[in-house]
């Protein structure tokens, strides 16, 4: 502890160099932490463990082709099926296009069964009110809070894909374990079907819940085979695969993010190695003076290493601080537009990774020059002026 | 060896190697310095003065012979033991002061005390005492760049004596100072010798500085050539 002041002062011997290095480290760590966290968030989104027994069934040709609603009847009869729900992305706007949130037309009864893991808490009375009211809707609590909605409010939606502007009665507010899952609105499928002639008896997708995750592959195969010769063939996939298709670029993204991380790490190593080498080399004489006074080689090595580690730590922590602030801004700013970013944080694992890596690079870049200067004979160090 | 000798060198040899070519610097040198002595080591440039001083101060190793300094046979100590020995017995004064630029005068003087088990308060007491001795108490907050050369050297002297070592070694301590400041530093060293009984071994080119010592020894071609007692 008594060496701390010495270490700190020595570190700021050349203020500009130290500050620039810390800034560089901070920006690098910020970049790594943010990119890795985005990757972790998307990964979590596409590998939702809750989704393991859900199947999305859509038209084989594309997401915008519709399937006959009656397909649900056949699917429901399969022994492995726990529930089927017609679900249509409505894409309605509330007041202003910037007020984005996902809203769906859905078969009302199965919603809570299909989304059992997401809709974890709701009032039975509100749920019954919703089922009874053809113009009713339910929303997640986070979404309701955002717009200050209360049960009983009328929420006007303006259709963008479909030519109707429903005025929905808010009948219920549900809660989820994660706020990401509290961002959506569901209203009665009938409303869409009756308001839009070309949607009569048709739907964009079915969400099927299997009784057991092990049944999923068999069920997918059976559904697609059954409808393969129909006029409207299906394409079924696990919910996660469906999300993945939605985030098609994810695979490439991971490669890109890992390459950027690697490149940044190499840059950090080069820059900090250079800084420490310069900082230590110009102190050759000083190290010799310390040792003449009686400091041992290992004590000097310790002091120099402490400097390098402290420098790395300052850079790493500021970078994580920046990333943390940015994550907050991203949650409030972009989170409502891109729903899976509403829970965006820097995971503890990513933080630890960044800290370990910066410390490791700090140690690595300091050790070599420090070891070299400490090994030099004292008399040579004193002569080197 | 004489009972009161603090330094006794016997057949000390030191060579440097340039490739396969041996460059002998010291060749079988004998020297005894009594406790409390004040010696000036003189001689032409390249005669090996610094080399000898470094051997006696335990920051270099001889290629032959033995050195017994402050009661220890230096050849018997390993590098870490030698470092511990230096921290207790030897104070260094350099031509270029060699203060740490990022520490103020107080902190510079405190440095050698960090190696002791002293508490913060005890360290502070000792530092203030040393600074008072060199008459720089009022400058203790100043950084080296805010001090004159003479003041810097006095801070360096305070740093050298703060652990109360028996032996002070100084290599050209006035080499970078003007006449007035040199005079001040020499007066200070004289006081340390006379009042605190420090043994001082000082390398110098400057006859005026050498005149402050009690005894002048001359090094020539690797051996001690003559010893002159200074009459005052
Ligand atoms: N590391 C070294 N490698 C090779 N030769 C060296 C080394 N150090 C010193 N020498 C040589 O040893 C001799 C004595 O050097 P030293 O520094 O002891 O002389 P000095 O008497 O202190 O001279 P000066 O008065 O110029 O300081 C010189 O010839 C020098 O070139
Ligand atoms: Mg010399």
Image (tube, rainbow, N blue to C red):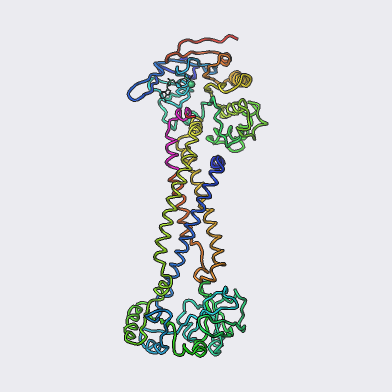
What residue is shown at x 51% (from left), y 19% (from top)? B203
The image shows residue A22, relative to residue B227, as above or below, that is below
Locate residue A7 relative to residue B142 in the image: left or right: left
Instruction: Say which of A281 and A165 sits in front.
Output: A165
Disc tally is 0
Among the 4 quarters of the image, the one containing residue A228: bottom left
Q: Label the magenta part by its dominant secondary structure.
A: helix
Give the extent of the magenta segment: A366-383
Rendering quadrant holding ligand 1: top left
The image shows residue A344, relative to residue B30, as above or below, that is below
What residue is shown at x 50% (from left), y 81% (from top)? A161
Residue B24 point in image, percent of width and height: 38, 19
The image shows residue A245, relative to residue A223, as above or below, that is above
What residue is shown at x 59% (from left), y 73% (from top)? A146
Instruction: Say which of A97 and A275 sits in front.
Output: A97
Residue A330 point in image, percent of width and height: 54, 65
Q: Is residue B222 visible?
A: yes
What residue is shown at x 52% (from left), y 35% (from top)? B115
Residue B90 point in image, percent of width and height: 51, 26
Verify whether residue A373 appears in magenta.
yes
Q: Is residue B93 visible?
A: no
Query: Dividing the image into 4 quarters, which one contains the N terminus of chain A?
Result: top right
Residue B231 point in image, percent of width and height: 58, 9
The image shows residue A287, relative to residue A351, as above or below, that is above
Among the 4 quarters of the image, the one containing residue A247: bottom left
Farthest residue in the right direction?
B138
Locate residue B104 relative to residue A205 in the image: left or right: right
Verify whether residue A380 appears in magenta.
yes
Instruction: Say which of B52 and B75 sits in front.
Output: B52
């Amino acid at each position: 502890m008594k060496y701390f002041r010495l270490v700190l002062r020595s570190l700021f011997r050349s203020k500009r160099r130290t500050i620039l290095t810390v800034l560089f480290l901070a920006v690098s760590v910020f970049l790594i932490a943010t990119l890795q966290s985005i990757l972790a968030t998307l990964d979590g989104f596409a590998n939702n463990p809750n989704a393991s027994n859900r199947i999305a069934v859509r038209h084989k040709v594309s997401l915008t082709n519709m399937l006959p609603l009656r397909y649900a009847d056949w699917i429901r009869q399969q022994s492995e099926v726990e529930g089927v729900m017609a679900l249509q992305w409505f894409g309605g706007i509330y007041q202003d296009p910037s007020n984005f949130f996902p809203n769906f037309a859905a078969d009302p009864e199965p919603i809570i069964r299909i989304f059992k893991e997401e809709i974890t808490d709701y009032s039975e009375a509100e749920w019954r009110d919703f089922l009874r009211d053809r113009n009713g809707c339910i929303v997640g609590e986070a979404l309701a809070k955002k717009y200050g909605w209360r049960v009983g409010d009328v929420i006007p939606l303006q259709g963008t894909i479909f030519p109707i502007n429903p005025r929905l009665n808010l009948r219920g507010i549900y809660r989820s374990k994660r706020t990401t899952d509290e961002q959506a609105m569901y209203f009665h499928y009938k409303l869409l079907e009756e308001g839009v002639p070309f949607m009569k008896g048709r739907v964009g997708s079915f969400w099927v819940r299997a009784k057991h995750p092990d049944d999923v592959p068999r069920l997918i195969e059976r559904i697609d085979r059954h409808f393969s010769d129909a006029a409207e063939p299906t394409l079924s996939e696990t919910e996660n695969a469906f999300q993945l298709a939605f985030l098609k670029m994810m695979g490439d993204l991971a490669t890109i993010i890992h390459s950027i991380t690697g490149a940044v790490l190499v840059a950090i190593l080069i820059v900090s190695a250079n800084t420490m080498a310069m900082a230590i080399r110009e102190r050759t004489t000083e190290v010799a003076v310390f040792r003449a006074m009686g400091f041992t080689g290992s004590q000097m090595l310790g002091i120099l290493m402490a400097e390098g580690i402290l420098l790395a730590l300052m850079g790493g922590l500021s970078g994580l601080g920046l990333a943390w602030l940015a994550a907050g801004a991203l949650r409030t700013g972009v989170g409502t537009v891109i729903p899976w970013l509403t829970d965006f944080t820097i995971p503890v694992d990513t933080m630890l990774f960044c800290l370990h890596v910066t410390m490791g690079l700090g140690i690595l870049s300091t050790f070599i020059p420090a070891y070299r200067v400490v090994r030099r004979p004292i008399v040579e160090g004193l002569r080197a002026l | 060896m004489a009972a009161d000798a603090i330094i006794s060198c016997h057949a000390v040899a030191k060579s440097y190697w340039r490739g396969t070519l041996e460059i002998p610097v010291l060749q079988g040198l004998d020297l005894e310095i009594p406790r409390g002595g004040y010696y000036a080591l003189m001689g032409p440039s390249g005669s090996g003065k610094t080399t000898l001083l470094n051997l006696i101060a335990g920051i270099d190793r001889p290629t032959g012979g033995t050195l017994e300094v402050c009661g220890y046979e230096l050849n018997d100590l390993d590098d870490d033991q030698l470092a511990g020995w230096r921290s207790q017995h030897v104070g260094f004064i350099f031509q270029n002061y060699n203060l740490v630029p990022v520490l103020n005068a107080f902190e510079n003087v405190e440095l050698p005390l960090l190696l002791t088990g002293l508490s913060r308060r005890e360290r502070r007491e000792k530092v203030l005492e040393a600074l008072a001795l060199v008459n720089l108490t009022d400058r203790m907050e100043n950084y080296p760049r805010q001090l004159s050369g003479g003041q810097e050297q006095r801070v360096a002297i305070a740093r050298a004596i703060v652990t109360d070592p028996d032996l002070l070694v100084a290599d050209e301590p006035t080499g970078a100072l003007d006449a007035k400041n040199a005079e001040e530093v020499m007066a200070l060293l004289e006081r340390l010798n006379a009042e605190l009984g420090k043994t001082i071994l000082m390398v110098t080119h400057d006859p005026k500085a050498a005149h402050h010592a009690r005894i002048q020894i001359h090094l020539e071609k690797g051996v001690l050539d003559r010893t002159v007692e200074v009459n005052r």
